Image (cartoon, rainbow, N blue to C red):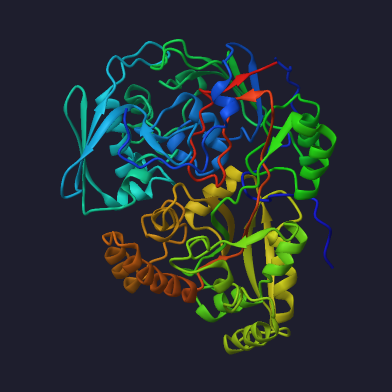
């Protein structure tokens, strides 16, 4: 028996269940610019006003050390207090521009990148900030202290050979080999540069503890003044920000609200000004709000490319038997997930995103075993595989699934899908941080997760999920032939030659049945029209999460 959709995005970044009462308060780039997300003429012509408090809906149950979190939900908080070396423009979303670095140069062999760091930087607590902080943050990502997981920095570990500061204004990064994706990697919103003096307090031998609120410091446009996990992040303008005319806002509040209906109510009344990243209104709910509020609100439709599905722990029984992993993949009904959880707006999430037609398209992937709509052959083969492994309806095998706390979700659909082929599930319901700790120890049979890619390149998948060193590769998947092809494609700058290599890699990934991909869904982020200077990211990839350019016309 199934259910009607009541939850929008289970295990995407769980919203806390604590209710919140909050008051309503009124250098030159070497990357070519793109035009897909440019600010509107109206936004350019308007004169910004200083003051006011922006309220955004988002999860707040996250760690305060920016590099120890994997969820997009965390970026809205960190983006206010920590810059990146380079960044995607908050006004032209897919143009790379300077962040902490005012400018940069690339050597003729594309192996050495030289960054000129802005001079006179200070944190909002008045501490000097410069090349030592940049080098420390990047080196920390390359060699995490105390084996601290850094889930979103795999692209750096994959390509960076060394980072040095030859003088007080210059940082030089040397690559292992040429990489077409490096600038996108370094401009990723996960590449936050934090003050060295703060990190040293928690990075010493045998430490590895979490940051405390009073320890957080940064050089971003806002300063963190309050954090109540599961309730509130509150930021105030950083008067010493290196762009003296910014930010315009006095404050930013990021608030948790426990369920989607309450979120929509807060947005409808104008108590909240921007919806959450993933827990957005459905298509029908969006249309209802537009009909009710007209041009007072604005929505876009965005596909958050990335990985979503179940990681199968092939390093322990029973899923060390590839036949069981393949059977689960074949029996898992993506159409059920799409209809029951996603209003049929889901897109196949992996091996790589289908919008990269130079590798393969969504239509092509939809014909693959397990992904195709007609399940007749898939279910027959799944039953056969389970029987070959020594199990079946009369001798069921049980797999343990580490699930989130929101229901209904893929875990329950999985349970129903596997019963006919003789596999039972034991669902373990735990909060996000507990589940993450379990995943990092490999203490699971199946681990459902959903994470967006950090930048617009297949290397975002490779660096975040598929490489043995990837922070989100919790099962430490490793395939020698895949790794050989990986080394070949990452050096290939010709897309026409690179695509076929990635097709081979995708086939190897798919046929190992370790990452059992499901679907990613279109989201409908919205904001009130009086929120000016805000350009919503159309794909959630080219993203700078800072609200430095935002102001309120009310």
Percent position of residue 441, x then y: 48, 54
Percent position of residue 346, x then y: 66, 59
418, above or below 343, in the image: below
- At horizontal 55% and vertical 40% (from top left) the residue drawn is 537
- At horizontal 84% and vertical 68% (from top left) the residue drawn is 1
Percent position of residue 428, x then y: 67, 56
548, above or below 288, in the image: above
Percent position of residue 308, x then y: 58, 58
Left or right relative to 127: residue 522:
right
Left or right relative to 521: residue 471:
left
47, above or below 132, in the image: above
Quarter of the image with the C terminus is: top right
How many numbered callouts?
Answer: 0
Which one is in front, 179 or 253? 179
**Res 143 seen here:** no
Left or right relative to 435: residue 542:
left
Left or right relative to 131: residue 269:
right
Which one is in front, 55 or 141? 55
**Res 367 seen here:** yes
- At horizontal 58% and vertical 37% (from top left) the residue drawn is 536
Which one is in front, 95 or 235? 95
């Amino acid at each position: 028996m199934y259910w009607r959709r009541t939850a929008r995005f289970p295990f995407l970044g769980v919203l806390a269940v604590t209710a919140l009462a909050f008051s309503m308060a009124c250098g030159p780039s070497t990357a070519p610019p793109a035009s897909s997300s440019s600010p509107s003429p109206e936004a350019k012509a308007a004169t910004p006003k200083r003051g006011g408090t922006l309220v955004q809906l988002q999860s707040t149950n996250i760690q305060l050390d920016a590099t120890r979190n994997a969820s997009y939900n965390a970026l809205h908080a960190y983006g206010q207090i920590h810059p990146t070396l380079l960044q995607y423009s908050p006004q032209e979303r897919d143009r790379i521009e300077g962040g902490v670095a005012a400018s940069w140069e690339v050597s003729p062999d594309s192996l050495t990148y030289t960054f000129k760091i802005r001079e006179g930087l200070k944190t909002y607590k008045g501490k000097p900030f410069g090349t030592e902080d940049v080098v420390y943050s990047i080196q920390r990502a390359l060699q995490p202290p105390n084996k601290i997981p850094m889930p979103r920095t795999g692209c750096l570990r994959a390509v960076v050979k060394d980072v040095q500061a030859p003088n007080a204004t210059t940082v030089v990064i040397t690559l292992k080999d040429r990489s077409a994706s490096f600038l996108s990697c370094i401009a990723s919103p996960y590449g936050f540069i934090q003050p060295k003096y703060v990190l040293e307090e928690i990075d010493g031998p045998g430490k590895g503890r979490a940051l405390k609120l009073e320890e957080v410091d940064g050089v971003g446009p806002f300063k963190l003044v309050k954090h109540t996990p599961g309730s509130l992040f509150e930021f105030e303008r950083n008067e010493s920000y290196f762009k003296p005319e910014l930010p315009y806002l006095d404050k930013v509040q990021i608030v948790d609200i426990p369920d989607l209906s309450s979120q929509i109510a807060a947005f409808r009344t104008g108590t909240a000004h921007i919806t959450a990243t993933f827990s957005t209104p459905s298509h029908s709910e969006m249309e209802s709000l537009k009909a009710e509020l007209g041009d007072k609100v604005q929505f876009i439709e965005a596909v958050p490319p990335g990985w979503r599905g179940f990681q199968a722990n092939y390093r322990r029984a029973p899923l060390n038997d590839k036949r069981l992993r393949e059977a689960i993949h074949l029996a898992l009904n993506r159409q059920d997930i799409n209809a029951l959880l996603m209003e049929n707006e889901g897109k196949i999430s992996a091996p790589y995103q289908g919008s990269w037609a130079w590798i393969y398209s969504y239509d092509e992937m939809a014909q693959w075993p397990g992904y195709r709509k007609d399940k007749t052959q898939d279910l027959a083969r799944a039953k056969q595989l389970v029987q070959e492994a020594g199990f079946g309806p009369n001798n069921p095998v049980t797999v343990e699934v580490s699930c989130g706390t929101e229901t209904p979700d893929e875990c329950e659909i999985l349970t129903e899908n596997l019963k006919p082929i003789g596999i039972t599930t034991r669902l373990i319901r735990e909060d996000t941080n507990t589940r993450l700790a379990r995943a990092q120890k490999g203490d699971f049979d199946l681990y459902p997760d959903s994470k967006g890619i950090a930048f617009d390149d297949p290397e975002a998948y490779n660096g975040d999920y598929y490489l043995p060193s990837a922070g989100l590769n919790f099962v430490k998947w490793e395939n020698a032939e895949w790794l050989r092809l990986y080394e070949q494609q990452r050096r290939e700058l010709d897309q026409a030659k690179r695509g076929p290599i990635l097709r081979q890699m995708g086939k190897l990934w798919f046929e190992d049945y370790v990452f059992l991909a499901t679907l990613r869904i279109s989201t409908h982020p919205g904001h009130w029209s009086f929120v000016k200077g805000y350009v919503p990211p159309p794909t959630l990839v080219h993203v700078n999460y800072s609200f430095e350019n935002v102001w309120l016309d009310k």
